[in-house]
Each structure stands twice: as C-alpha cells, then as structure tokens.
Image (spheres, rainbow, N blue to C red):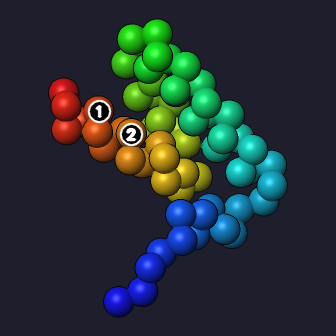
Amino acid sequence: MSIIQINEPMRNLSQQQKNEAEQLFSRALQSAKANDYVTAAQYYRQATKYGHPGAQNNLGNQYKNG
C-alpha cells in the first residue's frame, strides 16, 4: 500500500489552474465561516473540478452533515 501525497491530485495542473483552485477554496472557506453554506458548497464544487483535496474533503463533509 502506498501513501498518496496531498498535492498529488493537482500535480498536473498549470500554476494558473492551481491558483484558481486555491482562490475558489479560499472563497468557500470564507463563505462557510460566514455560515453561508450554500455559497461555500458552490465554491467547493468548482474547486473539486481542479482536484483540490481540501475542497473535496469539505464538500464531502457538507453532504455528510446535511
């Protein structure tokens, strides 16, 4: 069994794409902090399209927690 590095999902992206994913994730975190979970989920979904692992995790938690 091998350990997957946290940045592995985004390794093949351009720097611009990585930056976009990070910006979307940051906006999602800000929205969640403001208790705007609908907007946070929208940003998480957009960031997951880039393979952002934090966005994938947080979006999964939102689904889990309703």
Residue to which mark 1 is pinned:
62
Q: Is residue 24 left or right of residue 41?
A: right
Question: Residue 37: which quarter of the image?
Answer: top left
Residue 12 horizontal/vertical position (percent): 69, 69
Query: Where's the N terminus, which quadrant?
Result: bottom left
Q: Secondary structure at mark 1?
A: helix
Check the image and report above or below for 28 versus 13: above
Tag 1–tag 2 contact (CB < 8 Å): yes
Residue 10 horizontal/vertical position (percent): 62, 62
Residue 33 horizontal/vertical position (percent): 46, 16
Residue to which mark 2 is pinned:
58
Check the image and report above or below for 1 versus 50: below
Check the image and report above or below for 58 versus 41: below
Query: Where's the C terminus, which quadrant?
Result: top left
Local crowd at mark 2 within 10 Å, few (<14), some, or many (≥20)? many
Q: CA distance from mark 1 to mark 2?
A: 6 Å
Local crowd at mark 1 within 10 Å, few (<14), some, or many (≥20)? some
The residue drawn where x is 57% and y is 35% is 25
Given the image, on which type of amino acid does mark 2 rest? Asn
